């Protein structure tokens, strides 16, 4: 049971203004912020809620200081949250970043950008550069890698929402 704060996107006089319709969120162990525009499909709101609430649940189960989380932790938390969207809402509601890179492309990107930096901490600049993309680092690389790793893991292991809150991030790259 957490408070959920809603903020408008793409409103003519809204607090946050964007040029296209969209949705996003930020979650913490004790609260959730959702940023919404006028969505044509109410299931899009459900997908956003499922993704962000998965973060809340995992953060509560993992405990610890969020600043100490590694890039691998961040990659996996994003992948798990979006995998829950797949299971709860369907493939149609997956974020675009889930299919930005093919598995073959990701293998090369993983070696080139991610594999040597998986232990970088959230407070280090490289963490966000690799998670979100920056400069020569492809856009949303960490997010996309996370979804592909989680998808691959659960193609060989049985999925359980409850278990997904506690599986250590390192299990996804074993």
Image (cartoon, rainbow, N blue to C red):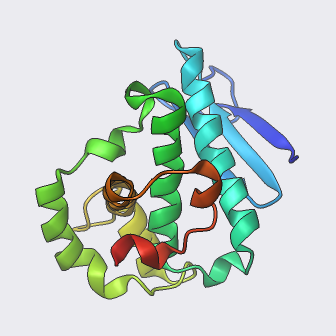
Is residue 129 positioned above or below 32 on the image? below
Q: Is residue 38 left or right of residue 60?
A: left
Observer-nearest residue: 162 or 136? 162
Observer-nearest residue: 173 or 141? 173
Q: What residue appears at the point 24 percent right and 76 percent down from the top-left corner?
A: 113
The quadrant in which residue 116 appears is bottom left
Quarter that holds the C terminus = bottom left
Looking at this rendering, what residue extends furthest in the top direction?
40
Q: What residue appears at the point 22 percent right and 68 percent down from the top-left corner?
A: 136
Please tell me how many numbered marks the rendered image carries: 0
Q: What residue appears at the point 80 percent right and 40 percent down from the top-left corner?
A: 5
Observer-nearest residue: 72 or 7? 72
Residue 79, x across and y down, in percent: 45, 55
Is residue 4 positioned above or below 142 on the image? above
Q: Is residue 125 left or right of residue 36?
A: left
Residue 69, x across and y down, in percent: 59, 79
Residue 74, x across and y down, in percent: 51, 68
Is residue 45 positioned above or below 65 on the image? above
- Does residue 7 appear in this view? yes
Q: What residue appears at the point 48 percent right and 46 percent down from the top-left corner?
A: 82
């Amino acid at each position: 049971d957490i408070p959920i704060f809603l903020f408008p996107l793409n409103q003519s006089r809204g607090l946050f203004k964007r040029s296209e319709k969209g949705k996003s969120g930020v979650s913490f162990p004790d609260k959730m912020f959702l940023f919404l525009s006028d969505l044509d499909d109410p299931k899009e709101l459900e997908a956003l809620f499922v993704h962000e609430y998965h973060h809340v649940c995992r953060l509560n189960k993992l405990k610890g200081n969020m600043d100490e989380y590694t890039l691998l932790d961040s990659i996996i938390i994003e992948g798990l949250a979006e995998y829950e969207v797949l299971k709860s809402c369907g493939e149609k509601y997956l974020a675009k970043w889930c299919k930005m890179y093919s598995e073959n492309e990701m293998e090369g990107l993983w070696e080139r950008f991610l594999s040597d930096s998986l232990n970088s901490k959230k407070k280090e600049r490289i963490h966000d550069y690799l998670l979100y993309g920056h400069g020569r680092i492809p856009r949303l690389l960490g997010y996309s890698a996370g979804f592909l790793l989680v998808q691959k893991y659960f193609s060989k292991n049985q999925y359980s929402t409850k278990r997904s809150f506690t599986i250590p991030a390192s299990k996804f790259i074993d």
